[in-house]
Amino acid sequence: MRKISRSSNTKELELTIYSDGFGTVGETRSLEGMEGAELEYLDVPALLEPDSLVIRGLDVLEYSFEYDLISREWLISRYKDRTVHLKNRDTGSVKLVKVLEASGMLVFQDIETGEILVDSHDELILPLHPDGIRTSPGIMMKVKEAGREIKASYITRGLSFTMNYAAEIGDERLKLTGRAGISNNSGRTYRNALVRLMAGNVARVNERPEMMYMAKSIQADASYGAEQRSVSDYHMFSLQSRTDIPDGESKQVQLFAGSDVPFSKHYLAGNNMDGAQPVITFLNSKESGLGMPLPEGRVRLYMLDGNSLRFTGEASIGHMPEGSEVELKAGKAFDIEVEGSETSRNQRNGIDYVRWEAKIRNHSKETSVIHYELYIWEKFEPRSSSPAYEMKNSNTLLFKIKAKPDEEVLIKCEYSSDKRVHVAER
């Protein structure tokens, strides 16, 4: 006799969802009255990875994952060599036939006359199958011993989350709100689940390809909030309230909101760029009103305009640990004009002497900070500059300047590049 366990027997349900497109499920179910040697563990995800299953509370001899995707051909194939009914669509008369072939063209044999019927257009009526028809996935287990509870853990594909941020930028402070977009395309609905989100890239061997689904969306629920802690080299966010995640849907869950975060603004320009790009910079620290790891995601920027918010662009960030500096780069500045060119190059004794100039004009009504990056593709030696520079890396000089309203600032730089061929002595 088989015992059937369904999701209605669930006492505890936990989900850990990874941004890489999979999740782990931990489920505790009551198991009262287990008498037979077989257990049907039903209501599991269609994208469950069977080899990831870990069972506690049962002494399992063997198990198999079964999921029948119903189609006309598959359904009829279940009745091969069995007796079914054919009903004449005109007269309503019914005769018993045996299914000889179910793939492609249907072939039957009349039980009474022995005639072979090929591709009959009569209505096919299938009686109750003795083994049943499975329309939802399940794990079939042969059990030696069983307790009163069963704890199952497994990995399933089709669960994922992405981070979405909203930065509301004022004059000197900003508000950063982080929401997780949780998607469930695993083939199962999760009710009253304790949900954890794991940020970081988890290594997996021979990853299986994802199946694509169309997902519905439901409105964000801002009543959650999340508790964060580190797990090994990853960061885990635990939602403070249990939630339902229906199959085929996605939802937005607020993880945190940092208010009154101080920031600075400058414009990034350079000889490898077209124009200037606005950059918002802030520190991810407790003193700044944040101080928690920020998962990789997209940031939408809004500027406060009186009592209204104006969307000004989008930026992206990688995984930002606590204490790191966050830069948000979006759009192109309208009021900052940049021109730069090499003004001269002279060679003496195999050495090039190069002059570079850049003009930056500030057409805005406020003083602007501009970071100009001069990328030099050749091996060089700086000789002079105005204003002073910082070495950003071995190929880039960084000039930090301030331009008053309607002011033009001139950057001058001279460097040398040795073009001589040097032969190493042996």
Image: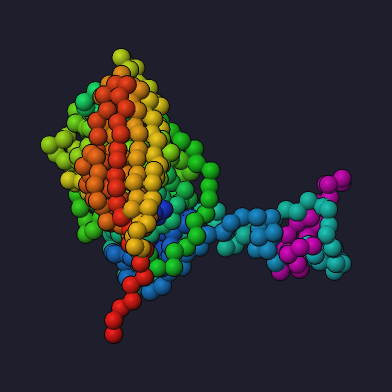
Q: Is residue 322 above or below residue 129?
A: above
Figure disc tally: 0
Asked whether residue 92 is drawn in magenta, I would say yes
333 is within the stretch colored magenta = no
Q: Position of residue 208 (x, y in %)?
A: 47, 63
Residue sitting farthest toward the bottom: 426
Q: Name the colouring of the figure.
A: rainbow
Which percent across, then down, holds residue 182? Answer: 38, 43
- What x and y, as percent, mark residue 320? 26, 47
Q: Is residue 382 visible to us here?
A: yes
Q: Residue at x 41, y 53 (%)?
A: 21
What residue appears at the point 38 percent right and 50 percent down from the top-left corner?
A: 345
Name the residue located 41 percent from the left edge and 50 percent from the top edge: 159
Asked whether 305 or 426 is in front, the reply is 426
* Position above or below: 184 against 54: above
Location of residue 294 with respect to 334 vertically, above or below: below
Stretch of the chain drawn in magenta: 81-105
From the viewer's perspective, tell me whether residue 399 is left or right of residue 160. left
Q: Quarter holding the C terminus?
A: bottom left
